[in-house]
Amino acid sequence: MLMVARRRSVTLLLLVSMLVASPSAALAVGSPATPPAASAAPAALTPGSNAAVKADGDCLRIRQSPALNATSLTCLPEGAIVEVIEGLVTADGYTWQKVRSGSIVGWAAEQYLEPAGATGGACPATAPVSRPVSARPAGLTGGALPVQGGFGLTVWHGGTTEDIATTATAGGCQLAAVWATSPEGAFVVYIYGAPEVVNQPWATVFAGDEVPDGTAILVVCSGPTISALSSGSTQGAGSPGPASTRTSAQQVAATPTPTPTPTATPNPNATPTVAAKAALVMDGNTGKTLFEKESHLTLAPASLTKMVTAILAIEQGDLDAWVQVDVDSRQMPGSSLMGLLPGDCFQLRDLIYGLMLPSGNDAALAIARHIAGSDSAFVDQMNAFVTTLGLTDTHFVNPHGLDARGHLTTAHDLAAIARYGMSLPTFEAIVGAPQWSAKGSRTINLPNVNGFLSSYPGADGVKTGFTDAAGRTLVSSATRNGRRIFVVLLNDDYRYEDAAKLTDWAFAKPG
């Protein structure tokens, strides 16, 4: 059984020969031919807990079943964290534990797992720095999504099946199924919400649930949906949660997005009208206010809060530092999430991308505890920061923006915060990235849920938000001919349309 992968060709050839000659042989690369004695088994792993891969520096193969010839679903690196789930089988002299890694569920030899934290829980000292997944626009390109239902042919730029659902939902498609072709040219389908056995052919073709960059796919949309970019969950910033918090893309709320009122060519001398409860337009170069509507009214900002969390992390933290996470995203249903699990190890840089792109509330907590030691200590730093900017109408209670008594700010203050943030090259690069692949103890692909980035020419930031109290919120940024315009919209059902209208109007005015 090749459970621990090594790149030693001679050994591999010998093992393959032995397996062909004797299919019943149970071998592990680097292990004795005789199965380990029962006394060598590690401490019992409890379903619902986390375990770490301990494979002497190699990667551990997660298999489709404990059977000798079972398909390998993925190979997890040393130190990777898996969730232990119900299922324990003894076969071929080994004890096999059923585990979950992201969206992958499979079996691993128990002797190569140990309770998370058993080795002290230290993150690696060094590791490859994560890279953007692609310079191309995130997710699905090359064809229009059939937002009213039907079929659409498009191209996927790499990521998991759940990433496809997230990105499609962001584009207005309530995804029911996706078709693709295998390397052999056969069609294979994934049906969202269907039992695992139905989607087994898909899992076989796309090992590890990774659909490669450049794959042509046919998406099947079941009807109109709230765009994840326009609404989000009741307690998040606009992205459906991971598989652990929803069973399919069809569970995303299906309330249609309001139809925007058509606008004519902007007249710089006319006063714009917007649906927002509060709004402000700022010239980013000069800091001058060009338009305002109740800009000093204190309102709930939702995930626009995360701009300050990101700024403090960038200015106070080491972006290459490894952070061991104690946040459990499974305990945050209904939230927009990066998808963190206790024991995960990611660089601070990855956590900031997870904070700003999918608007991870779990990432906000992980960052706060890493930077300040506790949630409350970090909130104190947030409030001290806005004071240093001279902002007197803002008070934060948490690092993520979920509704809480006294968690309030204004359109005026948010514009000042955004302008400061965009003066930091790292902040500017993060909020403008279409997607990011966080590579730590496991890989998490992070699409940017800010729909303004892909819908407005020259858009380069900044952040979306949504909660019950705040409604739909947005801080947008766009640059044209070296001139940057910020737009802040609070409680605006037409936030993308109004942002585009106000940005056009501002660019039409003299600088």
Image (spheres, rainbow, N blue to C red):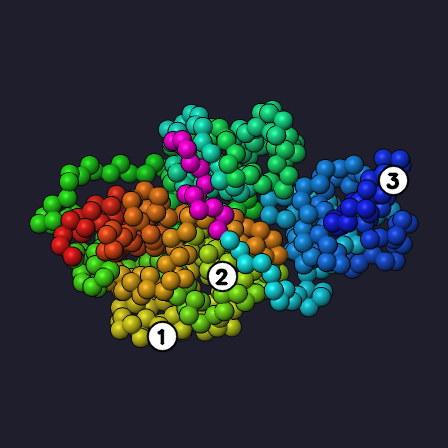
Kind of residue at badge 3:
Met
Magenta span covers which residues? 132-145
Any part of residue 489 in sight: no
Secondary structure of the residue carrying numbered label 2:
helix
Q: Disc 1 or 3, which lies upstream in sequence? A: 3
Find the distance from the CA under tag 1 to the CA under tag 3: 66 Å
Secondary structure of the residue carrying numbered label 1:
helix
Is 210 on the left-hand or right-hand side of 252?
Answer: right
Quarter-of-image position of residue 26: top right
Residue 363 placement (x, y as % from top left)? 49, 59
Q: Nearer the viewer, residue 438 or 51?
A: 438
Find the distance from the CA under tag 3 to the CA under tag 2: 45 Å
Q: Disc 3 or 2, which lies upstream in sequence? A: 3
| Identity of the residue drawn at 24% across and 38% down | 260
Q: Which residue is mark 2?
A: 349
Q: Nearer the viewer, mark 3 or mark 2?
A: 3
Residue 355 placement (x, y as % from top left)? 45, 57
Secondary structure of the residue carrying numbered label 3:
helix
Tell me, yes or no, whether the two marked residues, 1 and 3, touch with CB atoms within 8 Å: no
The rendered magenta stretch, by its main secondary structure, is classed as loop
Quarter holding the N terminus is top right
Q: Which residue is mark 1?
A: 384
